[in-house]
């Protein structure tokens, strides 16, 4: 009997039984001529199947069907599972983020991570070249067997398809999705993923958005940054309205604020240019120049470049403004003679950094001296005989520490040398009051001060001459 003959049906046992295999070879059916599968026929059935070559899927108990009894059934192949997309970054989901707690946050007994209710994972940043997702290959499936023991190939699963949007690229082998620029991941319709380096947040930064961190080129907030919230942007930032009390805004690029930067607990750090309507009581550090369109009220501003407060009221009233370059405002001080400090030609932020690095040089220098002293003492001991276990351990430890300390000291010394040319006195810097300057204003050029003990009711310029800060009228035209 051949498989081909069996698909048409073959009579066996002297015609007492018809054995037939389905065309797909997945089922064998025995049909007794007398209609019943008697015990005698069941006893000889294994021998009949052996002779027919039906070796797989024999049923221990034949199953009755309309045409007879099923005596063997093949195993169908299992289709492979389709491939999937594995995301290597956490996609935006609006759920609070776990992070190490800062001092005073969370429950000390709750573990090393803290659920920050203001970190809502609405913004997920990726850097250019970072892998966003990869394809997990499909499985090949499991082959089946027909009743003759022949293998039935399995159908493999299909590869999942990426849905790339703007700002992403697919690798040459088609297996990974990579960010083409630094910015924010956006989920679009039908699973499409994009990366945006420009982003507008409609409304305020508040409890609905949580803290914001954005590493793209430009961000705009149409509303305000509300009390207690933090915004960190690596590019430029526009804020349509105000920055409120207790907010912390840090921008590597430039910051443009349409309204007021207000309140004593507010901290602003800008790497480039700061432009705003007014500043009230805040602590502001600017790496470029600062332009204020109305007034500065009792704030502390450290600005590496020039400062201009020449529109609107144009007043610096109370507090202290330090400009690395020159400064212009309509009015210095207030009619109530609130103490006001105007300093030009002095990069206070750089001076503070310089002092910290000087302290680091002293610290690392002292540590290196102690290490050398220890190694010298151990060398003297070793000259008299082999070192014991503990001294040898100390020697190995100090020997390992020495190059690390020397590297730290070299880096700190390099930073000092890099900063020192920028600390040269800028005594050509000038402070100009374009309308008037009130008493109790202190004008400082680099490190020389002039205390105004009376109101100056005319436009004047403060400049360094002959070892002192001098006042000269500003000539019209």
Image: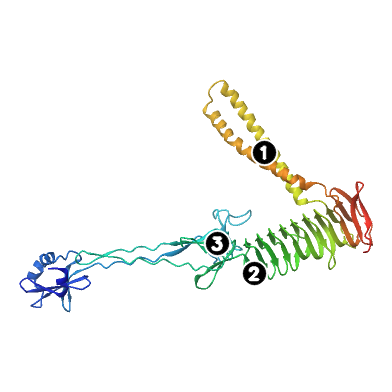
Closer to the camera in the image, 90 or 154? 154
Q: Nearer the viewer, residue 39 or 198?
A: 198
- Ranked by sequence position, the earlier of labels 2 and 3 is 3
Which image quarter: residue 146?
A: bottom left
Spatial CA span between label 3 and label 1: 41 Å
Which dot, 2 or 1, sits closer to the camera? 2
Q: Which mark is residue 8?
A: none
**Total tally of numbered discs in the picture:** 3
Secondary structure beneath dot 1 equals: helix
Q: Nearer the viewer, mark 3 or mark 1?
A: 3
Quadrant location of residue 220? bottom right
Up-down relation of residue 470 to residue 121 (above or below): above
Residue 227 x/y as whole percent = 69, 65
Q: Nearer the viewer, mark 2 or mark 3?
A: 3
Q: Which mark is residue 179?
A: 3
> Residue beneath label 1, please?
364
Mark 3 Cα-neighbour bin, 10 Å: few <14, some 14–19, many ≥20: many
Q: What residue sits right under mark 2 in the picture? A: 200
In this picture, residue 227 sits left or right of residue 25: right
Colour pattern of the rendering:
rainbow
């Amino acid at each position: 009997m051949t498989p081909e003959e069996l698909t048409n049906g073959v009579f066996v046992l002297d015609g007492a039984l018809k054995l037939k295999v389905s065309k797909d070879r997945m089922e064998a059916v025995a049909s007794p001529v007398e209609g019943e599968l008697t015990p005698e026929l069941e006893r000889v059935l294994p021998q009949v199947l052996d002779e027919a070559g039906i070796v797989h899927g024999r049923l221990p108990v034949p199953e009755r069907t309309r045409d007879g009894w099923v005596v063997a059934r093949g195993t169908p192949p299992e289709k492979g599972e389709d491939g999937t997309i594995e995301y290597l970054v956490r996609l935006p989901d609006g759920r609070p983020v776990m992070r190490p707690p800062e001092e005073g946050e969370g429950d000390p007994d709750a573990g090393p991570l803290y659920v920050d209710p203001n970190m809502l994972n609405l913004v997920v940043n990726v850097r250019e070249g970072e892998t966003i997702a990869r394809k997990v290959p499909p499985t090949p499936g499991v082959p089946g067997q027909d009743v003759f023991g022949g293998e039935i190939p399995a159908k493999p699963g299909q590869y999942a398809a990426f849905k790339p949007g703007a700002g992403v690229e697919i690798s040459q082998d088609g297996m990974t999705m990579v960010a083409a620029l630094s910015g924010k991941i956006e989920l679009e319709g039908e699973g499409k993923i994009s990366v945006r380096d420009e982003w507008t947040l409609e409304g305020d930064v508040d409890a609905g958005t949580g803290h914001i961190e954005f590493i793209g080129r430009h961000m705009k907030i149409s509303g305000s940054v509300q009390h207690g919230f933090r915004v960190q942007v690596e590019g430029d930032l526009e804020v349509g309205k105000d920055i409120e009390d207790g907010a912390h805004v840090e921008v590597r690029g430039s910051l443009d604020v349409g309204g007021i930067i207000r309140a004593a607990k507010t901290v602003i750090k800008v790497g480039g240019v700061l432009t705003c309507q007014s500043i009230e009581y805040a602590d502001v550090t600017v790496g470029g120049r600062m332009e204020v369109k109305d007034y500065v009220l009792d704030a502390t501003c450290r600005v590496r470049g020039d400062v201009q407060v020449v529109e609107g009221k144009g007043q610096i009233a109370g507090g202290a403004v330090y400009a690395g370059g020159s400064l212009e405002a309509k009015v210095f001080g207030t009619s109530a003679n609130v103490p006001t400090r105007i300093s030009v030609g002095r990069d206070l932020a750089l001076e503070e950094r310089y002092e910290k690095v000087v302290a680091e040089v002293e610290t690392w220098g002292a540590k290196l001296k102690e290490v050398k002293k220890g190694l010298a003492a151990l060398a003297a001991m070793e000259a008299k005989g082999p070192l014991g276990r503990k001294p040898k351990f100390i020697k190995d430890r100090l020997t390992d520490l020495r190059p690390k300390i020397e590297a730290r000291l070299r880096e700190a010394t390099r930073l000092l040398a890099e900063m020192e040319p920028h600390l040269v006195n800028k005594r050509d810097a000038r402070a100009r009051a374009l309308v008037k300057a009130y008493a109790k204003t202190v004008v400082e050029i680099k490190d020389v001060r002039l205390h105004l003990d009376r109101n100056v009711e005319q436009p004047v310029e403060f400049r360094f001459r002959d070892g002192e800060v001098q006042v000269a009228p500003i000539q019209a035209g």
